[in-house]
Image (cartoon, rainbow, N blue to C red):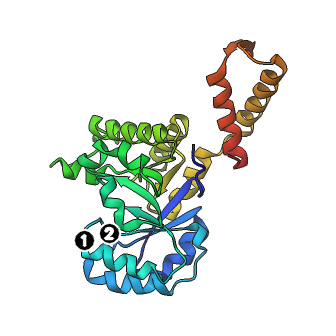
Amino acid sequence: MTVFPWGPALLFCPADRPDRYDKALERSDAVILDLEDAVDPSRRAAAREAIAASELDPARVIVRVNPSGTDDQAADLAALAVTPYRAVMLPKAESADGLAGLRGLDVIALCETAAGVRSAGELAAADGVVAVMWGAEDLVASLGGTSSRYADGRYRDVALHARSAVLLAAGAAGKPAIDTVHLDIADLDGLAAEAEDAVAVGFAATACIHPSQVETVRRAYRPSDEQLGDAVELLAAAEAAGGGVFRHGGRMVDGPVIAHARAVVRRATGTS
């Protein structure tokens, strides 16, 4: 599995709001400067100028450019060429051919259309792709639908299918997967539940749309002292057992269980 170069909480920031850049970066593990959906087309030229003039830590900056084949993307890439920023998020990614203009950049392929979800495996395996993300709202829009969730906040089946499909595609290619945003900013309990589920099934990060969501995501991805202690104890027992299946804490322990414990330690220590 490719090491995820950022922390678990990625925060979107409209690229036409340079007054928010520093604060967004300060409050998150990495900031996604958004030149696509968050910026009115009439303000994209000013947003590109703002990115070109910014002086943020390039190791913690991702720029969401516009979709492949658009004049906007060409202008986005021209602006990026004079910056040290080399990580981009490609929205509405649908095929490896659409990555041709992004050579030399670290690409997060955002699968948020029916075609993109169907091509998630191809995108995840493509050269230059460092992570894969999914999106619910554009996906449902691409299907002609109106809502990705039920009234109680649960995802509809098509969104859950897309989430799983993208996660599996990323895992098969050895790439990290990023879980999508939780649009209900006030619903921190719902965000916490989704982030905890994301951790449990192997997502590397969750995207945020508001600074208030960051700590909830970080808390979900950070193992508790008890979880870390149990994992360390289990790994020590595995080493003492010298391999093979053994009993620990009343349950059978084999290779997958040991791998789960190692994942907990990795999240706690930030090691690969």
What element does badge 1 sit on?
loop
Q: Is residue 91 visible?
A: no
Which mark identifies residue 42? none
Q: Is residue 62 visible?
A: yes
Disc 2 residue type? Asn
Q: Nearer the viewer, residue 93 or 27?
A: 93
Other-residue count near label 2 (Cα within 10 Å), few / some / many at <14 / 14–19 / ≥20: many
Give whichever of 120, 23 is nearer the camera. 120
Q: In the displayed structure, does residue 33 sit left or right of residue 152?
A: right
Residue 17 located left or right of residue 238: left
- Pointers 1 and 2 in contact (C-beta within 8 Å): yes
In the depicted structure, whether residue 155 falls above or below residue 242: below
Q: CA distance from mark 1 to mark 2?
A: 7 Å
Residue at horizontal 47%, vertical 55%? 207
Image height check: is 211 above or below 198? below
- The picture quadrant where one finds residue 57 is bottom right
- Residue 267: x and y in percent read 66, 44
Badge 2 element: loop
Classify residue 141 as left or right of residue 57. left
Q: Is residue 228 above or below residue 242?
A: below
Residue beneath disc 1:
70
Residue wearing tag 2: 66
Which residue extends farthest left?
Answer: 144
Image quadrant where residue 37 sits: bottom left
Crowd class of label 1 (few under 14; some 14 to 19; many from 20; radius 10 Å): few
Report the residue at 49% width, 82% height from top: 19
> x, y (%) of residue 96?
34, 53
